Amino acid sequence: MSIIVNKWRMDSSLNALIHCETGETRRLGEYHFILLETLAKNADTVLSRSFLMTEVWKNRIVGGNSLPTAIHALRVAIDDDGKQQEIIKTIPKKGYVFNKSYLTITESAVNEIREDSVADNNETPTESSGDEQVNAEPQPDIAVIKQPHPVAPQRNTIKKPRHNVMVIMLPIIIISLILFSLIYYIKTTPTPATVDAPLLIKEEAEHADRITIYHLYNEGTHEESSALVSLHLRPGMAKISPLLTTHNALMTLYYKVSLDKMVLDIVLSNQCNKSWQLVLNFKNWQNKDTEINTILFQEVEKMLNEIPKCE
């Protein structure tokens, strides 16, 4: 079974998303991947925040902003508009729901059609399973074609290309059902109440090729997205960058600030495509640059030293 979200196929062996058309790969943190998988497997069901925290982070103690930060990171990864929320919707005071219209679960339907074709060409009757009955849905149309031609030789000539018709019609039927479901869902689903959806902006870090930084902030707060990194976290980034090179690791940093609080959500991944997450909270963070950068460096260094080496 393969789960595809908005043309992005989930690859559990890499904790990554692979685009079905371009082949582009977007790696996710371990908990981000588990969160997306949990939402997709419970599509069209409203999942509470407490349920998601328990399912994804288990007994790990994390900050209160870890879930919304991860949600918005996923929206960026699967090309979901954080304001429109077409795929992952925020339900005020309830939780989150995944739009099933953007979900495709592929099965080995092609193999079943081939097995059916071989069986009919050998003219050996077999007992059909539930999946084969689905593939046999176009048969009434074929029967209508046969009725005006009861002569045995003519029926044999029609029977031979029957599965070619099935192979052509099956994708058309599936696409039609998907489009019909999408149109029905759009017409019947009420427009959710407008909420202040946080925005996730990617930033550049100078002389830190192994560090990717995202700034999470609410629209209309007039926060300067580049000021925090360039003025407050630059010393810490400069010290962490050589560590990442030494350990052959990558780092993704999500941060959000308010007047009295700063939250840092850090994801470290090594060359084995495994990831580890660290969440740091700082209260009354302003004018504490030295303390923040010292703690940030120490915690990242500690985690890198604890990461096992690839076998």
Image: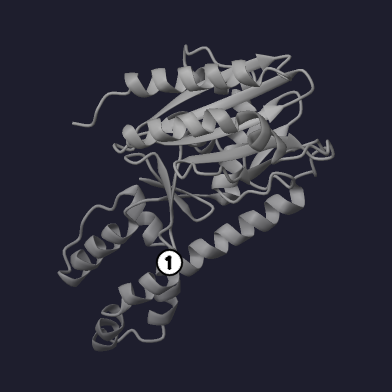
Quick one: 45 or 172, which is closer to the camera?
45
Q: Is residue 257 left or right of residue 63?
A: right
Quadrant of the rendered structure where residue 273 is?
A: top left
Quick one: 42 or 206, which is closer to the camera?
206
Residue in view at x 19 percent, y 67 percent: 118
Quadrant of the rendered structure where residue 269 is?
A: top left
Can residue 34 be seen here?
A: no
Q: Name the residue under label 1.
A: 170
Q: In this view, does 18 lie to the left or right of 194?
A: left
Measured as percent of width and height from the top left, residue 130 is found at 35, 48
Residue in view at x 46 percent, y 30 percent: 240
Measured as percent of width and height from the top left, residue 138 is found at 43, 67
Q: In which quarter of the image is the N terminus?
A: top left
Measured as percent of width and height from the top left, residue 295 is found at 54, 16
Is residue 287 positioned above or below 85 on the image?
Answer: above
Q: Within 10 Å of the Cα at label 1, are there few (<14), some (14-19), or many (20+) other Cα atoms?
A: some
Q: In this view, does 112 lie to the left or right of 261?
A: left
Q: Residue flagged by tag 1: what amino acid is it?
A: Leu
Measured as percent of width and height from the top left, residue 246 is found at 32, 33
Is residue 196 positioned above or below 51 on the image?
Answer: below
Quick one: 259 or 191, which is closer to the camera?
259
Can residue 179 be seen here?
A: yes
Residue in view at x 47 percent, y 17 percent: 298
